[in-house]
Amino acid sequence: DAGVIQSPRHEVTEMGQEVTLRCKPISGHNSLFWYRQTMMRGLELLIYFNNNVPIDDSGMPEDRFSAKMPNASFSTLKIQPSEPRDSAVYFCASSPSTDTQYFGPGTRLTVL
Amino acid sequence: AQSVTQLGSHVSVSEGALVLLRCNYSSSVPPYLFWYVQYPNQGLQLLLKYTSAATLVKGINGFEAEFKKSETSFHLTKPSAHMSDAAEYFCAVSEGTGNQFYFGTGTSLTVIP
């Protein structure tokens, strides 16, 4: 299995632009999680889905952030408009109907 | 509510010395506990997990952790540190299947040659 796939691996954009991060979970996994990692705040859960349905989005920082999971094999995290403080590494993780989360390699976002 | 506390944001050990990374948790239900490792510029990789079976859990790369309910701890150990063990280590707790994880703030391990 290829593991969790994230794209792009690196994104550099200017303030005000829309940014879309993509995630393909491991086939057969029914839970998907989006995290953000920064030096200041560590690893933060943004949102997670069970069977494509958002369960808890209380970690989404503000309305500029949105996440979708249109099917079991794809999810997006969108930031519109982006701000410099959104610069971070964004991780996607998926989990089968057990307990372990498997992480992708992350997307390093830089907003200038 | 669940939470994890990792004591010591930075730990340095000499190559060949014992590695001990501390993790304490709080949980209102029997917890599932995890240790993940993150190498530079990579995602998190599962080292080991406790899910209510044996209290001493062995993981990859020679690491192990012991679940101590009375101390609400799940410390990570390795008898002899290697240079390749230098990384960030995260402890996490969850209630189990399909539930979110609560991660600690991480411990950065440095191995001195």
Image (cartoon, coloured by chain):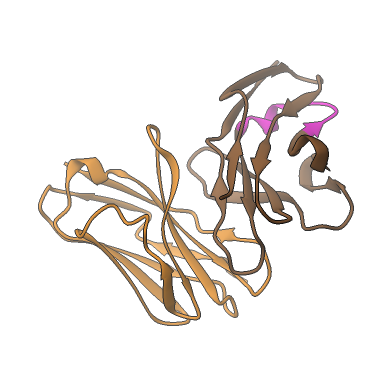
Q: Is A31 placed above or below A21 here?
A: below
Q: Residue at x 74, y 39 (%)?
A: B72
Residue depicted at 64% across the width and 29% down the height: B86
**Residue B66 visible, this angle:** no
Q: Colour of chain A?
A: orange
The image position of residue A86, as x and y in percent, is 25, 46
Q: Colour of chain B?
A: brown
Q: Quadrant of residue B110?
A: top right
Q: Residue A3 in magenta?
A: no
Q: Is residue A20 left or right of residue B12?
A: left
Residue A100: quadrant of the picture: bottom right
Q: Which residues are magenta?
A: B77-87
Nearer-the-camera pick, B59 or B34: B34
Whether residue A56 sits left or right of residue B29 in the image: it is left
- Residue B81, magenta (yes or no): yes
Number of dots carrying numbers: 0
Residue A1: where, in percent of width, then height? 63, 72
Above or below, B7 relative to B66: above
Asked if B97 appears above or below B53 in the picture, the reply is below
Residue B59 at x, y = what percent? Answer: 80, 48
Give me the residue at 76% from left, 26% from top. B19
Viewport quadrant of the C terminus of chain A: top left
Residue A78 drawn at (x, y percent) = 26, 64
